[in-house]
Amino acid sequence: MKPAIPKVTVQRLPVYLRCLEDLPAGQASVSSDELAAMAGVNAAKVRKDLSYLGSYGVRGVGYDVARLVLQIGLELGLERDWAVVIIGVGNLGRALANYEGFGERRFRVVGLFDIDPGKVGQAVDGLVVEPMSRLAAAVVERGARIGIVTTPASAAQHVADQLTAAGVRSILNFAPIVIKPQDGIDIRRVDLSTELQVLSFYLHRNGE
Amino acid sequence: MKPAIPKVTVQRLPVYLRCLEDLPAGQASVSSDELAAMAGVNAAKVRKDLSYLGSYGVRGVGYDVARLVLQIGLELGLERDWAVVIIGVGNLGRALANYEGFGERRFRVVGLFDIDPGKVGQAVDGLVVEPMSRLAAAVVERGARIGIVTTPASAAQHVADQLTAAGVRSILNFAPIVIKPQDGIDIRRVDLSTELQVLSFYLHRNGE
DNA sequence: ACATGTGAAGCGCTTCACAGCG
DNA sequence: CGCTGTGAAGCGCTTCACATGT
C-alpha cells in the first residue's frame, strides 16, 4: 500500500496546484527547481512531496504539467463538487459567500444561515439567508459535507455541534475560539487576529 | 540568554491568550491541564510552551491568570498599538476593515487603498478609501508596519513590493499566490481555498 | 548530461516521565 | 500531595547527497 501522505505535504499540494496553473499556457514540463521557486520552498521538498503521489516525473526532464495537475486534483478529491454551508452572515460570512475562489475548485456554497431574524430572507450572492431551524434539513437535502463557521465566538461550538449532528464532516472555523470536534470530525481554524499577533511577535522581537 | 521561542510555540501563544481571557472572571489560577483542554492541545505542550516565557507557574497550584495574560501580551508585543494598512477593498478587504477582532488586540487600521478609481473616496468603517499613489506617504506618516493584502493574485506581488519599499515590515497575504518576500520581510499567507482543499483531501481519503 | 527518486542523516517539535518545589 | 519544569527519548519532517533512469 501507498504510504500515507504527511499532513504538511497535504497542506502544500494546493500551493503546488496553484503554481502549476500559473505557468505559461504552453509550458508542458516543469522541474522541481522551477516549481520550488514559485512555491517558496526548496526543490528537495517538492520532489519528496510529489513522490508521495507516485512517480510522475521524468528523469532528466521534469514533471508533465497536465499530468501533475490531474494527479494532485485527484489526490485532493477535487474531481467532484463539494457542497458547503456557511453559518453566520456577518461581514466575513458575506465576503466568503461572494468569494469566487471557492467556485474555481468546485466548492459550491449551497446555504447561508444566521440566527438573526433581521438577516433571514436577505439575498447574498444569489442565495437567500435561511434561519438556523432549516440547517439540519438543508445539510441533508443538499448533501453538504463542509461547514464554514463565521459566527461570533460565543455561538461557534453550538453551531459546530449542530453541523456535526446534521451530517457535516469537516468544519472551517473563523470564530476566535477553539472548537472541540466530535469523533471523526475534522476542524481547521483560521484566526485573523492570531495571524497579526504572530507578525507582531516578530516585529517586536526584531526591535520595533 | 533566554533561548529563542520555537515558531510553533509563537503560533500557539495567541490561542492560550484567548483561552485565558475566556476563563470565568473570578478565576485567579489555571492548571496546564485545564488550559490544554481549552486550547485543544496536551498539557505537556502547554507547560513546555509557557516555560519559554520564564517560570510563571506555581508548583502544586498552577499559573496565575493575570500574570500569564500580561506576560504573553508582552512577548507578543501587544502592549503597544500597531498601525495596519489594507490594500484591496473588495469583499474581503471590506470585511477585514470592519473586523472588531483587530481592535481588541490594538491593531489599528489606519488606511484603505485600492487601485479602482470607483472605490477611491468610498467610506468604509470610518475610513475613506485612498488611491495607491497615496500609499507610500501614508505608510510613513501613520507609522504602519503591517500590511494586509486582499488584492487579486495578479496584483499581490507588486503591492507587496510597494508596501516593503514604503517601510512595512510584515505582510498578511490573502491573495491566492505565493509572494516572494524581500530580505527581512515577514509574510504570512492565508488562503481560504487552500483550507477547503485540505478538508476535501481528508473527506476524500475517508471514503466520501 | 541532467533531473528525478530516495535512503540516510539532521533537526526541531512532541511527548514522556519524573525530579523539584510549594 | 499536586502541579510545574525539564532532561531525554521518540517521532516526523527537512535536507542532503547520490544512485537511478532516460
Image (cartoon, coloured by chain):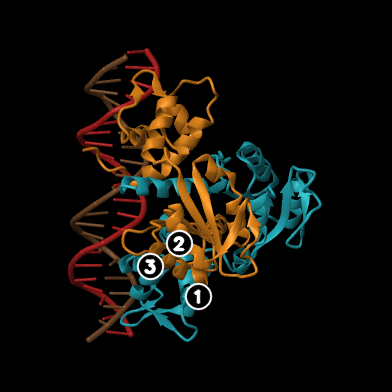
Chain colours: A cyan, B orange, C brown, D red
Give the letter of the chain under mark 1.
A
Taking the spot 35% from the left edge, 48% from the top edge, the residue there is A202
Badge 3 crowding class, 10 Å Cα cut-off, few under 14, some 14 to 19, many 20 or more, is few
Determine whether label 3 and label 2 are within 8 Å by CB: no
x and y, in percent, of residue A186 in the image: 55, 48
Residue B137, numbered label: 2
Numbered disc in front, either 3 or 2: 2
Residue A173 shows in this picture: yes
Is C21 left or right of A94, judged from the image as shown? left
Q: Is residue A122 above or below residue B117?
A: above
Give the letter of the chain under mark 2.
B
Helix, strand or loop under label 3: helix
| Residue labelled with disc 3 | A51
Helix, strand or loop under label 2: helix
Determine whether label 2 and label 1 are within 8 Å by CB: no
Badge 1 crowding class, 10 Å Cα cut-off, few under 14, some 14 to 19, many 20 or more, is few
| Residue labelled with disc 1 | A21
- Amino acid tagged 2: Ala
In the displayed orientation, state which residue is furthest to the right: A121
Numbered disc in front, either 1 or 3: 1
Residues tagged by mark 1 and mark 3 found on one chain of the structure: yes
- Amino acid tagged 3: Ser
Taking the spot 45% from the left edge, 33% from the top edge, the residue there is B36
Foreground: A196 or A6? Answer: A196
x and y, in percent, of residue B153 in the image: 52, 69
Determine whether label 1 and label 3 are within 8 Å by CB: no
Q: Is residue B6 above or below residue A74?
A: above
Badge 2 crowding class, 10 Å Cα cut-off, few under 14, some 14 to 19, many 20 or more, is few
> Can you tell which quarter of the image residue A142 is in?
bottom right
Helix, strand or loop under label 1: helix
- Amino acid tagged 1: Glu
